[in-house]
Image (cartoon, rainbow, N blue to C red):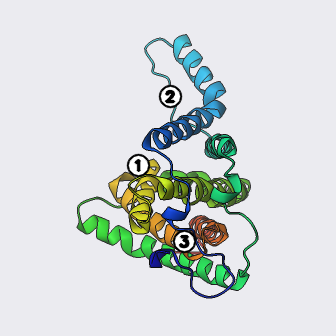
Amino acid sequence: MDSQAAVPGKGHRPLASGSEKAPIGWSLFVAQFITVALVFVIASFLPMIPFVVDAVITAMENPGTEPDLSDMSSPLFASTVVAGAVGAMFAIWLWLRREGRVREAIRLEAPANWKLTLILAVVGTVGTLGIFTVGPILTEALGLGMPDASFILDLVTESPAMFALWIVAVAWFAAGFGEEVIYRGFLMDRLERLIGLRNRPWAVLVIQALLFGLPHAYQGLGGMAVTASVGLLLGWIRNRCGGNLWGAILAHAAVDTISMSLAYASVLGLYGG
């Protein structure tokens, strides 16, 4: 087994190396990747349909004006995030069910060693917060610009109800659970099986991290770079947990919860960061 895939300590089933997993070809990988991406985009758009139709009708009733699609409410935007995650996970389930590899790729069984899993989750949480602290300074110095997530945080901090909605629906479900299933579960399993990447765990880590950064383009180049760095850390945690996703899920959800809570505390005047 490749040393990079070995798991320290006891209690975790070792992560199967690329040679131990049945390979898949590039044509299947591309088909799966494009399908999941398209379903994600389409599912994300579905909750917006009534809003878009209303905006277009309003513009038609007022000639000379353009449809204003920028005034989306916080619940509506949160629903697009959740819908996208649900759609992508459903497409993933269909593909993996066809291969009979749902449980093999999406490792959600209870960890055999919860202590190690929680330690790695804490490492991921602290490490990600460190990346969020140092990363913007580095991206600014490199000319990539500062990550800007203010649009999302403004929606999160609209009201106590919206704060609770985003914590539960987005931080814990769509992002913490959904993104880990999609990227550290499905995507990493596919890459580990892909001809040309088998037995190259660090190449798999880097590629999935770069792909994880792309959907965060709304934060600018700096935001994509910082997010990719976080994806690298979460992917490493997934590997150290033998492919089990709970360490990465807990770290991801905890970081988003902390970030949203600090933003809301700042709005309330309780935190000046």
Question: In this rendering, does residue 51 appear at all?
Answer: yes
Q: Which residue is mark 1?
A: 217
Q: CA distance from mark 2 to mark 3?
A: 45 Å
In front here: 215 or 152? 215
Res. 68 mark: 2
Label 2: which secondary element:
loop
Q: Residue at x 64, y 40 (%)?
A: 91
Q: Earlier in the sequence, mark 1 or mark 2?
A: 2
Q: Look at the numbered discs 2 and 3 and tell me whether their residues touch, using CB distance below 8 Å.
A: no
Amino acid under disc 1: Ala
Residue 255 falls left or right of residue 90: left
Give the amino acid type for the residue marked by disc 3 in the picture.
Answer: Asn
Q: Please tell me the numbered disc located at residue 239.
A: 3
Q: Disc 1 versus disc 2: distance between alpha carbons? A: 21 Å
**Quarter of the rendering containing residue 16:** bottom right
Q: Position of residue 263 (x, y in %)?
A: 56, 65
Q: Nearer the viewer, mark 2 or mark 3?
A: 3
Q: In the rendered view, does 11 fall on the left or right side of 184? A: right
Secondary structure beneath label 1 = helix
Label 1 neighbour load within 10 Å: few <14, some 14-19, many 20+:
some
- Going by the numbered disc 2, the residue's amino acid type is Asp
Q: Secondary structure at mark 3?
A: helix
- Residue 13 place in picture, x, y as percent: 66, 75
